[in-house]
Amino acid sequence: GAGVSQSPSNKVTEKGKDVELRCDPISGHTALYWYRQSLGQGLEFLIYFQGNSAPDKSGLPSDRFSAERTGGSVSTLTIQRTQQEDSAVYLCASSVSGTVDTQYFGPGTRLTVL
Amino acid sequence: AQSVTQPDIHITVSEGASLELRCNYSYGATPYLFWYVQSPGQGLQLLLKYFSGDTLVQGIKGFEAEFKRSQSSFNLRKPSVHWSDAAEYFCAVERDYKLSFGAGTTVTVRA
C-alpha cells in the first residue's frame, strides 16, 4: 500500500515569504506528526494530531509556524515570514493510533530559505 | 526529561564485517525504543522496535538490537554488513507519542 507522501520534495523560497508543506498520511492512520531535521538541532518534534482532539503544538518553534489537518487526513504545515534558520527537512509521519505505536515517515520536504 | 545519546558520530566498517551502533537513553519509566535508518535524500525507515518482552529484538535487513535496562542501552547490531547498509542510523525513545531522537550515527561501508 501507499506510504506517507509529502509535497513538494524541495522548496526554495526567499526570506520573508510564506510557505506551505503538505502531508498525506497512510490511509486509516488517525495520528499524524510533523518533525524537523536540521544540521544544528537534529530531529525535533513539531506538532501532533490525533483524531478530532486538539493538536499538541508544543514543539512549534515560534508563532510563525502553524499546522492544520483537514478531514482527519491531509495536513498542511505553514511557515509565515520565513527566516534562514527555518531551512531544514520537514518530515511527516503517521501511525495507526498514537501512543506506543510505530510512526511511519514520509520522504520529507527540503526547505531552503535564501 | 528524557534524552537519547548516540556516542559515535561516524563509524567506518568493511563490507562483511560486523557492526554495532550504541544507544543510551535517559528515561525513568519503561521506554519504548526504536531504531530508524535514513539513506541519503530519503525519509526514516523503521528497522526495529522494543516495547516489552524479549529483550533481543529482530528487525529488517538482518539487524537486531538488545535492550539492557541495567545499562540503559539499546544497541543495534548486524553480523555482516553489506554496502547497502551505508546510511545514517537514529535511535529514538517514545513518550506520550513524541519521538526523541539521538543525534545519529553515520555508517560508511568500505569495500
Image (cartoon, coloured by chain):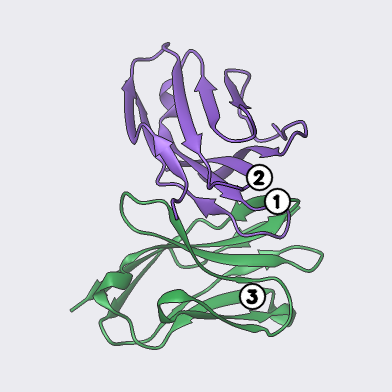
Chain colours: A purple, B green
**Does residue B90 appear left or right of residue A101 in this picture?**
left
Q: Residue A103 at what x, y percent from top left?
A: 58, 54
Q: Please give the residue where the numbered disc 2 appears in the rendered image.
A: A31
How would you rate the neighbour count of disc 1 (Cα within 10 Å): few for under 14, some for 14-19, many for 20 or more?
many
> Residue at (68%, 57%) from the top-left corner?
B94
Marks 1, 2 in one chain: yes
In front: B35, or B72? B35
Residue B40 x/y as whole percent? 31, 54
Q: Quadrant of the N terminus of chain A?
A: bottom left
Residue at 46%, 79% in the rendered image: B63
**Residue A104 seen:** yes
Q: Can residue A41 be seen in the rendering of this structure?
A: no
Name the residue carrying label 3: B73
Tell me if label 1 and label 2 are in contact, CB under 8 Å.
yes
Q: In what element is the residue under mark 2?
A: strand
As shown in the figure, which amino acid type bears the numbered disc 2? Ala
Chain of the residue where label 2 is placed in the rendered structure: A
Please provide percent x and percent y for residue A45. 61, 42
Q: Residue furthest left?
A: B111
What secondary structure is found at the residue carrying circle 1?
loop
Please rate how many residues cluster around mark 3, counting C-alpha atoms within 10 Å: few if below 14, some from 14 to 19, many from 20.
many
